[in-house]
Image (cartoon, rainbow, N blue to C red):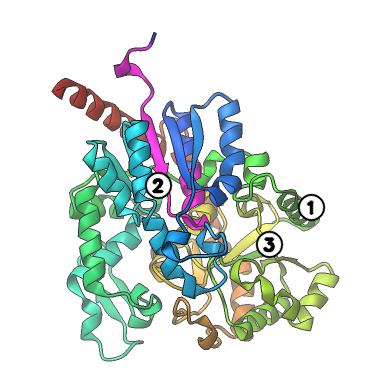
Amino acid sequence: MQSPENAAPRVYFIPFPTPGHALPMCDLARLFASRGADATLVLTRANAARLGGAVARAAAAGSRIRVHALALPAEAAGLTGGHESADDLPSRELAGPFAVAVDLLAPLFADLLRRRPADAVVFDGVLPWAATAAAELRVPRYAFTGTGCFALSVQRALLLHAPQDGVASADEPFLVPGLPDAVRLTKSRLAEATLPGAHSREFLNRMFDGERATTGWVVNSFADLEQRYIEHYEKETGKPVFAVGPVCLVNGDGDDVKERGRGGEACAATDAARALAWLDAKPARSVVYVCFGSLTRFPDEQVAELGAGLAGSGVNFVWVVGGKNASAAPLLPDVVHAAVSSGRGHVITGWAPQVAVLRHAAVGAFVTHCGWGAVTEAAAAGVPVLAWPVFAEQFYNEALVVGLAGTGAGVGAERGYVWGGEESGGVVVSREKVAERVRAAMADEAMRRTAEEVGKRARRAVEAGGSSYDAVGALLEDVRRRRREMVADL
C-alpha cells in the first residue's frame, strides 16, 4: 500500500468558464495527470460536456483524472437562458450577470475542497475566490495566468508607472519602462482602451491581491519563447514561475486534437473531417488559416472587408467565421463565395479543429487575434502569424510575436474594438491591406524559418529533459514538499 507521503499529489484545476481559459486548463490537467498527479478538472456543466471526452480518454489510458461539474448559479445572478460559458452569451449586456454567477461558484468550490481535500489548487488568475478558498484550508494555490510573462510584465509596468498618462494623443508612442527590452505602445493599443470600465486602480489592487494569494505562477509558455520575461516576472513578483507549455502539445494526432473543445459532437467531427480533407488537397504551405477566437465580434463591414481581402489576395484560405460572427456568414461578399466555389477558399461557420489545422502541412500562415492560446498553438506548430489584435492584452502579445520573437508580422491594426461596442467600431483594416499583408506573410521565407525553429524548440521543451517538462516536475515536487511540511506541522 502506498504511503500518504508517496501518494499521487491531488490537484484541482479550475478555469474561468470560456473556451480561451477552459481549453488550456483542460490540457494542463491532462498534462499533470500524465506526469503522476491525481487531477480533478472543475468545470461548469456546459464546459464539462465540451471537454469531457479528452479527459475520459486520458482516464481510460490510465491517468488519474476526472471532471467535476458545477451548476452555474445563473438564476441567483439574474442570468436566464441556461448560459454556462462566456462564448454562449447572446449579448454583451449579459456579461455582468454572468460574472456575478461565476463568483457565486465560490461557496460550491469551497465545499468541494472541504469534502474532497486537495494537495494543491491551480486556479484561473481571474478567479481570486478559488485562491481564497484554498488558503482557508491551507492548500497551496498556483495561479494559471492565461497569458504569457511578457504580457504580464507589460501590464504590470503600465499599472505601476503609467507612462501612457504622459502622452498627448492616442497614437503617440511611449516607452514602457522597467522591461528587459525597449517596448513601445500607444494608448489606442492598451487593454484599458478596449475594456469598458477598466479602472487602473482596480486592476492594480487585483494584481497585488493575486500576487499575495498565489504560491506561484503556472504559465502556458516555454523558455525559448520568453525566458527573460519569465525571469523578470519572477523577480518583480517574488513568486516562482512554472513555464510548462505549450500545453496544447499534450494532444496527440487522434480524436483529442480533432475534437478539442467540442467533445464528441457529431457536427464537430464532421466539420473537422471536412476541413482537414480540404487541406489534404492543397500544396504544402499554400493556405492561410484565419480565426479570431470565440469572443471576437467584428462589425459586419469589417467582416466584409476581411472577406474581400482574403479573396483578393490570391492565396488559398480557411476562414473560421464562427464565434460571435457566425451570423454574418450568409452576408459574405460574392467574391468569397466565388473563391469557395472555385476551391480556393473554405469557410467554417462553427467550431474549428484549430490545433489540427495549424499542424497540417498545407498551412503556411495564421491570421489571428493574438489571444495567448492562439499564439502558443501557432508557436507549437511552427506556423508564422499575421497579428490582428482586437482587445485586452492582445496588442502586447503582438509586440512579443512581431517585435521580439520574429515569428509574425502585423496586419496593420492600429487600434482594437471596445469590448461590447464593436458595432460602432467601423473598419480597422481595409481589404487592400488584408490582401497585401497576407501575400507578404506567405512569401516571407525568413519569418517562416524563424517560426519553424521556434516550433522545434517548443516541441523539445515538452520532451523529457526539456525546460517545460522539468517545470512540470518542479511544480509537482513543490506540491509534495509542501504536503510533507504540512504533515510535519500536524
Compute the Cα span from label 1 to label 2.
32 Å
Q: Which label belongs to residue 350?
A: 3
Q: Does the magenta stretch include residue 7?
A: yes
| First along the sequence among labels 1 and 3 | 1
The residue singled out by tag 2 in the image is 222
Instruction: Give the x, y percent position of residue 486.
Output: 20, 27
Residue name at image x 56 percent, y 67 percent:
292
Residue segment shown in magenta: 2-26
Residue name at image x 47 percent, y 59 percent:
74
Instruction: Give the x, y percent position of residue 120.
Output: 32, 35
Q: Which label belongs to residue 28?
A: none
| First along the sequence among labels 2 and 3 | 2
The residue singled out by tag 1 in the image is 277
Can residue 133 be seen here? The reply is yes
Please, what secondary structure does the residue beneath circle 3 have? loop
Q: What residue type is labelled 1?
A: Ala
**In front here: 286 or 82?**
82
Note whether 287 is above or below 142 in the view shown: below
**In front here: 204 or 155?**
204
